[in-house]
Image (cartoon, rainbow, N blue to C red):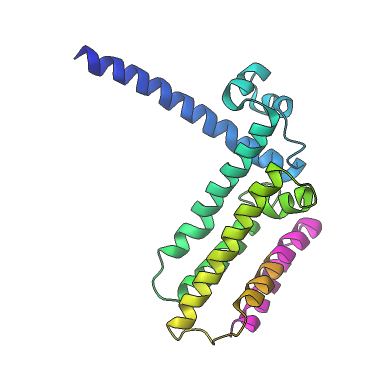
Amino acid sequence: MQHWRIMTTTDGRKARGAISRSTVMRLAVDIASVEGLEGLSIGTLAAGAKLSKSGVVALFGSKRQLQLAAIEAAREIFIAVVIAPALKVTGGRARLDTLLEGWISYSETRVFTGGCFFAAAMAEVGSRPGLLRDAVADHMEAWADTLRRVINRAVDLGELTPTADVDQLVFEIRALLDGANTDSLLTGSAEPYARVRVALRRLLP
C-alpha cells in the first residue's frame, strides 16, 4: 500500500508540473505569435505568466529551448485544431474541404492571438539558418505533405479532377490561405476569409 501512496504522490507532482508547463507554454505561443520568436524571452514570459525568471528557466532552460518548445507546442495545437478533425472525415473531397475549412477557422478565430503562428514564424526566421528555421520548415513541409496526400486521396476516389502537378496545387492553396491570414491581420476584417473561400471553390471545382 505504501508503494502506491508514493507513486500517487509522485504522479500528482508530475501532473501539477505538466499542467503548469502546459499553461505557461500556451501563453508562450501567444506571445510569439504577436511579438515573434525573438520577442519571446525568459523575461517576457515570466512577466506574462507572473512567474520568476528562475521558475521559467526551470521549466524550459535557455531562451533558445523556450523558442523551440513554443514551435513544438504550436505544432501540436495546429494538429489538434486543423489536422485531426479532417482525418476523422471519411471520403476524399469531404476530407479536403474539412481540412481547408479547418485552417481558415484556425486563422479566423485567432487560435493564436497573432493569427497563424507559422505564417508569422516563416516571415521572421525564413532567412536565418539555424534550429528555429529548421523547426518551422519541418512543420511547413509536413503541412504541405498532408495537403498533398489528402488531395491525392480525393483524386484516387474520383472526387476531385486529376491534376498533372499536385505540388503546384498545394503551393496555390497555401498561398491563398496565407494571404487571407495576412490581409485579415492588417485590416482587422473577416472579409479576406470570405474571399479565400470563394477562391478555393474556383481552384477546386
Question: Which residue lies at the image location 22% right of the left edge and 12% below the top edge?
Answer: 2
Q: Is residue 93 left or right of residue 66?
A: left
Q: Is residue 36 above or below residue 145?
A: above
Q: Is 43 contained in the magenta span?
A: no
Q: Is residue 6 left or right of residue 45?
A: left
* Span shown in magenta: 178-205
Point out the residue furthest to the top here.
Answer: 2
Question: Which residue lies at the image location 18% right of the left edge and 15% below the top edge?
Answer: 1
Residue 163 image position (x, y, % from top left): 58, 85
Q: Is 187 contained in the magenta span?
A: yes
Residue 165 found in image quarter: bottom right
Residue 106 image position (x, y, % from top left): 60, 57
Residue 159 image position (x, y, % from top left): 47, 84
Q: Nearer the viewer, residue 198 or 142?
A: 142
Q: Is residue 131 above or below residue 102?
A: above
Question: Which residue lies at the image location 80% right of the left edge and 51% below the top edge?
Answer: 127
In this view of the protein, can residue 25 be seen by the observer?
yes
Q: Is residue 97 left or right of residue 202?
A: left
Point out the residue furthest to the front here.
Answer: 129
Q: Main secondary structure of the magenta part?
A: helix
Q: Is residue 148 above or below residue 187?
A: below
Residue 90 image position (x, y, % from top left): 39, 71
Question: Which residue lies at the image location 68% right of the left edge and 42% below the top edge?
Answer: 131
In this view of the protein, can residue 93 be seen by the observer?
no
Residue 162 found in image quarter: bottom right
- Quarter holding the C terminus is bottom right
